[in-house]
Image (cartoon, helix red, strand yellow):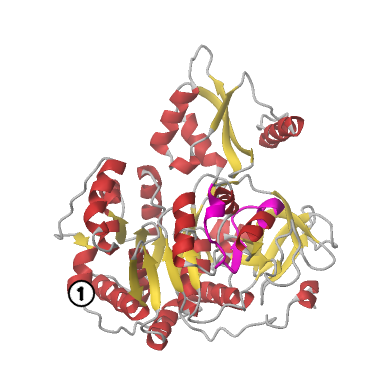
Amino acid sequence: MMNRPWLEHYPSEIPHTVTYEGRTLQQYLIDTAKEYPQKKALYFMGKELTYSQLYKEALKFANYLIEIGLKKGDRVSIMLPNCPQAVIGYYGTLLAGGIVVQTNPLYVERELEYQLSDSGAKFILCLDILYPRVRKVKSVTNIEHIIVTGIKDYLPFPKNMVYPYIQKKQYGIVVKVENKGNNHLFKHIMVYGNDNELNVSVSSKDDLALIQYTGGTTGFPKGVMLTHENLVSNVVMCSHWMYKGKKGEERVLGILPFFHVYGMTTVMNLSILQASQMILMPKFDAESTLKTIQKTKPTMFPGAPTIYIGLLNHPDIKKYDLSSIDACISGSAPLPVEVQENFEAVTGGKLVEGYGLTESSPVTHANFIWTKRVSGSIGVPWPDTDAKIISLETGEEVAPKEIGELVVKGPQIMKGYWNKPEETEAVLKDGWLYTGDVGYMDEDGYFYIVDRKKDMIIAGGFNIYPREIEEVLYECEKVQEVVVAGIPDPYRGETVKAYIVLKEGAQCTEEELNEFARKHLAAYKVPRLYEFRKELPKTAIGKILRRSLVDEEKAKLEKLS
């Protein structure tokens, strides 16, 4: 019998186990649209859609995908920021029996080509300004159809008329795509498509809803296979955790990107389940976020520490009314205690820390929002979720407060990695997911993360893998050796720093390396800092000691403080 000391701290409102009813994700949209047809589902820069409208537009997208050849199980890439099309495309794909492949709009061609090729996606829904990038890689992937949309498609008048000029000034390009051949305009689909109801047979337990790519220490991203059951169970757990939320009455601030599973679950899918209104923001900007909160009065605000820090550091924060916010769960990186306390003082709401991985849909742990919470802890496992700490040497469970690897088990744990059976076997053992994170559990069942077994960097909520950056920098002909590490950063959590040894006689500047990196990497992966060295610390067998470099940086910070 497994010991679960955390259950003693559960408030009566949160059940220890939950019934999931074997439903699919799209069934929640169908049910909510029928129960709350006139309830506002989306708010986007002044434009609103009801649940009835959202469902009908998702059906139009689904029917169109089937018309142009989608078969059950085909993959559909969605390369969009948070906007109505992202929600419509996601649920439309599921209604058609497809599998969503979320694609980061910041990807450069090399990254995009790898993901589309690996997933075998045949369809992609992208922004007009991303069309040239998609077009360039189309011939070396399985993509057959490109569906193009623009931010202006869902802006109210007169914003929709002005936006193209803003876009031209901001990005320096104007993209015009005709609804012709294998290029399709999303707007055309919404005007002329049919919204006939569909009844595609999908198994919640066995059929995939999503392939979500996560990086790997090898530098090759892996596609995490998440079934409907995985995603449904996690969002149902989430709804029970936030038990004070009232169905049909909440407003959720959607800054967390839906192309990350955290935003997808805690904002998009949770809102659909609870008939909440999603307030969509395509990107984070402190001032526009403060204005949006004051205007739209969200009650729930899932986020990351960098978002809350950015708001707290805004010089005019006290001029805005943020009192509508009741509950926030912070993820993606450790939540500093002072950030938690200051944000709660400003809003009057509750902000607690949680934990998860892409492989777990994503949440496994969180602090209680309205009862006992422990600062510095990731909290306790969610309903139906088991967790334990095992010895790094023996693999056996260790006693409370002993450090080891965190392993988790539950219905939200992935099916495995797409086309990567060996990598799957390495992290999934007897139903347990080996997280690679090192931590401990106290006597009360609260868990703490102290280090990462992996070398992953979390900067501004983004997962960044050093090996991928190193491989790019090694392509620079002037570089002899390179190691990339995450060093402490008070705002982003961690900052990417590259330590470089140049080839003998070579001359190179930070600016040159930065320009080189930006050609091959998404902006958030590009190192913020470079340090040139004559040599790098190594073991006796020549392995570069990344951790010693991080320890050096921490020692420097301690001296300064």
Q: Quadrant of residue 56?
A: bottom left
Secondary structure at numbered mark 1: loop
Compared across the picture, whether 288 is left or right of 200 comes to right
Q: Quadrant of residue 496?
A: top right
Compared across the picture, whether 277 is left or right of 170 comes to right
Most foreground residue, 315 or 276: 315
The residues colored magenta run 316-340
Compared across the picture, whether 341 is left or right of 3 comes to left
How far across and down, in percent of the image, does residue 391 sit? 79, 56
How far across and down, in percent of the image, does residue 425 sit? 60, 61
Q: Identify which residue is drawn at 34% across, 64% down.
A: 46
Compared across the picture, whether 58 is left or right of 371 comes to left
- Within-10-Å neighbours for mark 1: few <14, some 14–19, many 20+: some
Asked whether residue 323 is drawn in magenta, I would say yes
How far across and down, in percent of the image, does residue 431 sit? 64, 70
Q: In the image, what residue type sits under mark 1?
A: Gly
Q: Identify which residue is drawn at 49% across, 59% down.
A: 256
Q: Is residue 358 above or below residue 454?
A: below
Camera sees residue 144 = no
Camera sees residue 288 = yes
Which residue bears the numbered disc 1? 193
Asked whether residue 268 is drawn in magenta, I would say no
How far across and down, in percent of the image, does residue 434 sit? 66, 60
Most foreground residue, 196 or 175: 175
Q: Identify which residue is drawn at 80% across, 78% down.
A: 1
Q: Is residue 338 above or below residue 522?
A: below
